[in-house]
Image (cartoon, rainbow, N blue to C red):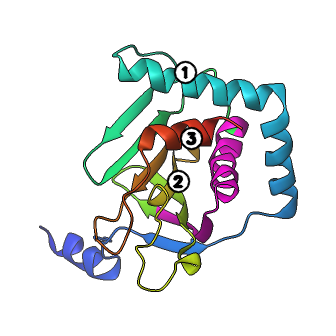
Amino acid sequence: MTYIDDLLGKLFPTRSKKLSHKENFLESREEASETLAWMDSDEGEGVLSLIYNNYHLKTIGINKKPEVHVLNSPYANGLAISYEKPLTPVDFQHLFFAFGDRLLALGYHRVSLDRKMEELADRVRMTEKLYYKPPFSSAMPNQPIDQLFGNVSIEKVSLDNKPSFLKLLVTVYSDRMYLPAKPFSEFIERVFKR
């Protein structure tokens, strides 16, 4: 290292820590009404039906576009949807909030809606996350709590402002304070079907 390199390094130090920012945000009334209209449209119903079918095909080893990945473990189950044709960025945005609307219809309440932006080596990843819990307030004293299907998170991940994937994950409580979670297969049916 030369004297000049050393001097420049002191004047303009390289940044070794990657930037990261997290914030809460709100879905506007206009966005909410657009999502509801999308869900009721032929386009929205077609996208939901396509993903529902692709999920079931994936469970028997058949991949179709957009690819659906099955997430399966004893305490967490879910699916991830790759962003690829025939999905559009608008479909992806509406799908993110549509899943949330379906959870509200199942009796869940939304706990949070946040966005995290992270600098990666050569990209920027943005993760928008919705988090839902079952209605614990309706529990009777000294009785196990009905957890419905468990806690639910919905994540939409973008890389450099381009959609990458959507993840829908259900995490169950294994504590004896809770009734056993309803089956994930029923969750899929209820989320995708009206």
Residue 183 position in % (x across, y down): 42, 45
Residue type for callout 3: Pro
Which comes before the other along the chain, label 2 or label 1? 1
Quarter placement of the N terminus:
bottom left
Residue type for callout 2: Ile
Q: Nearer the viewer, residue 11 or 19?
A: 19
Label 1, on which residue? Answer: 53
Q: Check residue 163 in the rendering and tell me which mark sits there, or answer none.
A: 3
Magenta-colored span: 90-117
Report the residue at 62% width, 68% height from top.
Answer: 109
Q: Quadrant of residue 190?
A: top right
Label 2, on which residue? Answer: 154
Which comes before the other along the chain, label 2 or label 3? 2
Q: CA distance from mark 2 to mark 3?
A: 14 Å
Q: CA distance from mark 1 to mark 3?
A: 21 Å
- Mark 2: few/some/many CA within 10 Å (<14, 14-19, 20+): many
